Image (cartoon, helix red, strand yellow):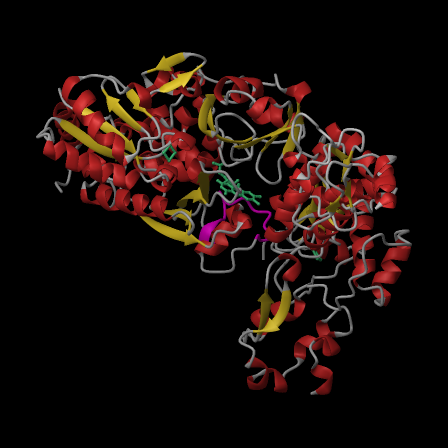
Amino acid sequence: MERFSSPRDLDQARQSAAQSRQGRLTLSLCSGTGCLANRSRPVYEALIAELDKAGAADKVIVKRTGCHGFCERGPILVVYPQEICYLSVQPDDVAEIVAKTVLKGELVDRLLWKQAGKTFTRQSDIPFYSHQTRQVLAHNSLMDPADIDDYIGYDGYAALADVLANRTPQQVIDEIKRADLRGRGGGGFPAGVKWETTRNAADPVKYVIVNGDEGDPGAYMDRSVLEGAPHSVLEGLIIGAYAIGATAGFFYIRQEYPLALTNTLKAIEQAEARGLLGDNILGSPFSFHVKVHQGAGAFVSGESSALVSAIEGRVGEPRLKYIRQSVSGLFGKPTCLNNVETWANVPLIIRNGADWFRATGTEGSKGTKIFSLVGQVEHTGLVEVPMGTTLRQIIYDIGGGIKSGRKFKAVQTGGPSGGCIPEAHLDTPVDFDALTQLGSMMGSGGMIVMDESSCMVDVARYFVEFLKEESCGKCLPCREGIREMVTILNRITQGQGRPGDIAFLEDIAVLLSEAALCGLGTSAANPVISTLRYFRDEYEAHIHAKTCPAGVCKALIAYTIDAERCQGCGACAKQCPTKAITGEKKAAHRIDQKKCVKCGVCLDACPKKYRAVAKVSSVSVVPEAVQTA
Amino acid sequence: MADNITLTIDGHPVSADPSQTVLDAARSAGVAIPTLCHHKDLLPYGGCRLCLVELRQGKRSQLVASCGYYAKAGLEVHTRSPRVLRARKLVLEVLLALMPYSEEIRRLAHENEVTETRYQRTMHYCVLCGLCVRYCDEVKHTNCIGFVGRGVERNVAWVPPDRYDQTCRTCFECMSLCPTGVFPSNFGLAEV
Ligand SMILES: Cc1cc2nc3c(=O)[nH]c(=O)nc-3n(C[C@H](O)[C@H](O)[C@H](O)COP(=O)(O)O)c2cc1C
Ligand code: FES
Ligand code: FES
């Protein structure tokens, strides 16, 4: 690989890469973790074989790209320049795609997206995409993450070249400050301010770090950016290092992300070979080196002091430190830690200017944010929207609303220690401050949609249970407070709740938020506090009336058979796994509550025309049903 | 040594060395702050959270562990504000469940009007203050014992298990540090 020794070399490479694209079709096949799981590799192999057979291999460029975001409908294949988007592509489909689209420019209709009676050809017209603003993720469907020249061909490293040739470090910092870029890892701290503090710290040895720990269950924003656009993150990091005056940097990537790791390592290797990383970058006096650290993948390791400890080779556990890391961080040196998505925004800001970046977003939060939209919505996936987009727009316009026609109940944002937001606040514009005001948070961008079949006490229990497993156990409030919260929530959902339990939960929440050592502990009560704030009646129903309004908590529900309606067909009895249902043929059946394990099979088995089986959760019915058993 | 600076603790000006923690400064000025995981020969740890104090700056207020926060000029420290006392009581309620046999904890609880605990009594004998582990590391440099497990599974153990025979047999210095007073039985060392 040729080494660039000046910005001019880079520019020539850009031109020739752009030229080589001219007049050729590009087939972008998603090879993100989601699509690989949906067998995108055999599709790739079929594609290569089929193109060869058709003698069309020279006419097209086949790229294996990062995640396109609509993983649920993967593998995704996009044909440029027309941007024809084929979904759920299987190896069998490839021959037809080559024969029709590649050779004749025709569409394969059955692979196109259809919604509300309409067919969508272009990827960006599909409602899932059309309501998004994909700035950071733009690279993902367009570029081969394993090929630095592809990135260069789309203006990659132009921002770095510009910065090295034309701007002082302070000018770069000023641009980032003016853009008002806030940290995407959760806290929303102004990145430019952090850079400046690190730069101004007295010690001449400084470090920059990419936080790619992403421990939130179900979230994969950072994984997808590292897999699909590792060069964006790397370019951002190099620019940051130049501005801050750092000579060494680290990627902290969790072990569970093998593809992100591979692609990052490859990106570093190629950037070094191209002279974009290492000594005298692009012939300038600036030198910068990068290492990758694999994390053990605990949720708490993403916390800044724990992450720094881990890179130092110690236990990845939060430390008592009241000196900011920008003054004394890794190995006691001034250190600037930013999230994957934060770094990935940097080249965009430098290339397009702070004003361009500020044009998107709200007063207090500029730019876009990536969310992983999961749960009971029609369309799940990775979405990038302008800050200030409402929850309703994300869930309904992009996500297509609630699955199977049920009613919306709450959306959980901010990861395990975020909060649940009810219907009444769906029109809230999503930004750092608005979510915090609602008792939730931005976190790193998890978004779990729940419908009416979710019990909010059980949801809170689920998240606090997760945090109990993830607490490092070092400080007493977190270890013992979360443990006790789980005990209380377990007993409430099992129908053993006691009158003082809500007050006790609220006191533990104060203990956690006031006294815990790190951010895991201080935010750990959010799932409980936010559900108490918006769904207190559900807690009260569990504790006092011993009912679960959503019909989820097994100890508080029962299945009964209405003797009037039951025709004695025996369908339920046949399927009952514990043989709890008895009755004569053509006579009303009964459920032995002692044997019943509340699996609900009988409810589904009962023919729709009879509707004799019912799930009940109310004081009057449960004890009676139990008594008659 | 750097020049002394002045901070205020509970409204009184106190002179301190900037290498001192707020806890040290308070104690040398005769202000009592309860601690459990602090030891003068060991690095600040911040595990027990008994030593929390409130820092105020204009309208802003923040709770910090005084055992790890270093004295700064002009710092406004409160050791008995309502916010501090509320947090301290909540910490003591936990400790009362974990080590009800400790005279010191019972005294502190009494002093802070914590008479009962709603927490399940887990009777762990070890409150994971880490004094023994850190002493073994920072003072003896032997690292015979360490923390194993995470969260509620966290425990103190020999790493590796045969370290006991090699080194501990002739030392036992950490035992006197244990705030629970039951260290020997906890480790099964009483029988040794
Ligand atoms: C328990 C805990 C887990 C965290 N996990 C992550 C994470 O996985 N990724 C991340 O970028 N930040 C995480 N953070 C936030 C980091 O501590 C830090 O604030 C962030 O990486 C700074 O980067 P930013 O300013 O670009 O957001 C976590 C914080 C806490 C308290
Ligand atoms: S992995 Fe292919 S769309 Fe996400
Ligand atoms: S004495 Fe400060 S946290 Fe334990």
Could you say which is closer to the camera, residue B56 or residue B150? B150
Q: From the viewer's perspective, tell me whether residue A507 is left or right of residue A473.
A: right
Classify A315 as above or below A575.
below
What is the x, y in percent for residue B183?
73, 75
The picture quadrant for ligand 2 comes to: top left
Q: Is residue A18 magenta?
A: no
Q: Is residue A328 magenta?
A: yes
Residue A204 seen in render: no
- Taking the spot 65% from the left edge, 40% from the top edge, the residue there is A601
Q: From the viewer's perspective, tell me whether residue A223 is left or right of residue B3.
A: left
Q: Which residues are magenta?
A: A318-331
What is the x, y in percent for residue A488?
77, 47
Name of the residue lying farthest toward the front? A585
Q: From the viewer's perspective, tell me whether residue A562 is left or right of residue A234.
A: right
Residue A242 occupies quadrant: top left
Quarter of the image with the N terminus of chain A in it: top left
Q: From the viewer's perspective, tell me whether residue A293 is left or right of residue B177.
A: left
Residue B127 occupies quadrant: bottom right
What is the x, y in percent for residue A23?
13, 19
What is the x, y in percent for residue B4?
65, 51
Looking at the rendered structure, the number of numbered marks drawn on it comes to 0
Could you say which is closer to the camera, residue A561 or residue A13? A561
- Taking the spot 18% from the left edge, 40% from the top edge, the residue there is A274
